[in-house]
Image: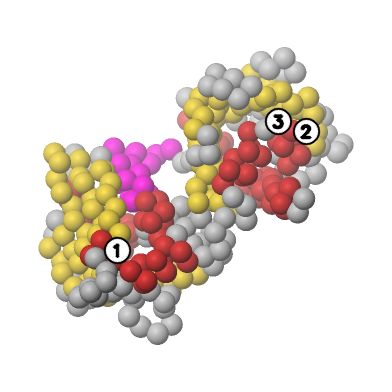
Amino acid sequence: MSSSKTESQSEREIVLTRVVDAPRSLVWRIWTDPAEVTRWWGPTGFTTHTQEMDVRPGGRWRFVMRGPDGREYQNLITYLEVEAPARMVYRHGGEKGLEPVSFETIVTLEELGPTRTRVTLHSIFPSAKARAFVVREYNAIEGGKQTLARLAEHATTLANRAGERRDFVMHRVFDAPRALVYEVWTGVEHLARWFGPKGSTLSGCRLDLRPGGTFLYCMTFPGAPDHWGKWVFREIVPGERLVFLVSFADAKGETVRAPFDERWPLTMLSTVTFEDHAGKGGGTVVTLRWSALEATSEEQKTFDEGHASMGQGWTGTFEQLVEYLGSLRAR
């Protein structure tokens, strides 16, 4: 590509780097294996469906990305250079019916040792205007960072031979600024208005927002006994992340077994992240991840089998959050 006289090379580029705790050969494999690449490719909350993938010079990868808001993005990558396991060059776009973006990307994988790899993504656009378009319309820089973060997580999981434990994970896009979404997760007056499945109400809420502090609440369903729950905060990164222990409790805040099943894990670890939505429309992506903490095999099995009902409950909760955010923005 040749740059215009008024544009420098840097005005047409996006360069992103991430160090991954996994061998270079593994990182290369999960980037070129169609069964693996779709498990991490795309920003937070996105899924990818491969229609064809032929990783060789002149080969193509045609795929559809689906955002957490349901929007679909048709994509095509054409490989220009493939030098396993260190480098590949590909062209993104170039056909009708695809997203209106076109650029070339150089991917380099640099060994930093037997178990660490530096990944560099160097995208070059035909003009500064074309670069500005993808940043503005698709939030491309944030999307690239989130994609590399997903790559790192997946590669590390495989490198550590993890994966026996199943986490519960949900993504949801909210049409509101990240600062506001974070605020309604961390203000007791807000939580009392939306937190909990549809049909439930909260009372007796007490919140101490600090590492080691707790959120204690009483949840009521029509025709059912009240039950108490609590969060114990482990990590708080304002505007970005909340990490806390989740358990059922009594009115004094003491941890108790779940009222519906003695085999349910006594304590769970919850991580809630807040990220800018990397796609059209803007907004905030909330990712919710729960895992059973120090669970017995029976408790882990019960937790795994309960993912569907957890999904239903959190879907209703998120619907209430959508409505509440809408009411705040309408003021």
Query: Which residues fall within the magenta stretch?
Result: 147-165
Marks 2 and 3, Cα distance to the nearest angstrom? 11 Å
The circle drawn on residue 188 is 3
Q: Is residue 59 magenta?
A: no
User: Residue visible at 87% across and 36% down?
Assistant: 223
Comparing marks 3 and 1, which lies closer to the viewer? 1
User: Residue visible at 49% across and 33% down?
Assistant: 237
Say which amino acid is labelled 1.
Glu
Q: Is residue 149 above or below residue 86?
A: above
The circle drawn on residue 202 is 2
Q: Nearer the viewer, residue 169 or 17?
A: 17
Q: Name the outermost residue toward the right.
A: 223
Q: Nearer the viewer, residue 252 or 258?
A: 252
Give the left or right position of residue 147, taking residue 247 as reference. Answer: left
Do we see residue 68 in this rendering? yes
Secondary structure mostly taken by the magenta-highlighted segment of the chain = helix
Say which amino acid is labelled 3.
Val
User: Residue visible at 42% across and 69% down?
Assistant: 133
Which residue, given by chain and number where applicable, does mark 1 sit on?
Answer: 11
Comparing marks 2 and 1, which lies closer to the viewer? 1
Q: Nearer the viewer, residue 24 or 128?
A: 128
Give the left or right position of residue 311, taking residue 235 as reference. Answer: right
Where disc 2 sits, the SS reads: strand
- Crowding around mark 3 (Cα neighbors within 10 Å: few <14, some 14 to 19, many 20+) is some
Q: Name the outermost residue toward the bottom.
A: 96
Do we see residue 319 in this rendering? no
- Crowding around mark 1 (Cα neighbors within 10 Å: few <14, some 14 to 19, many 20+) is some
The N terminus lies in quadrant: bottom left
Marks 2 and 1, Cα distance to the nearest angstrom? 52 Å
Where disc 3 sits, the SS reads: helix
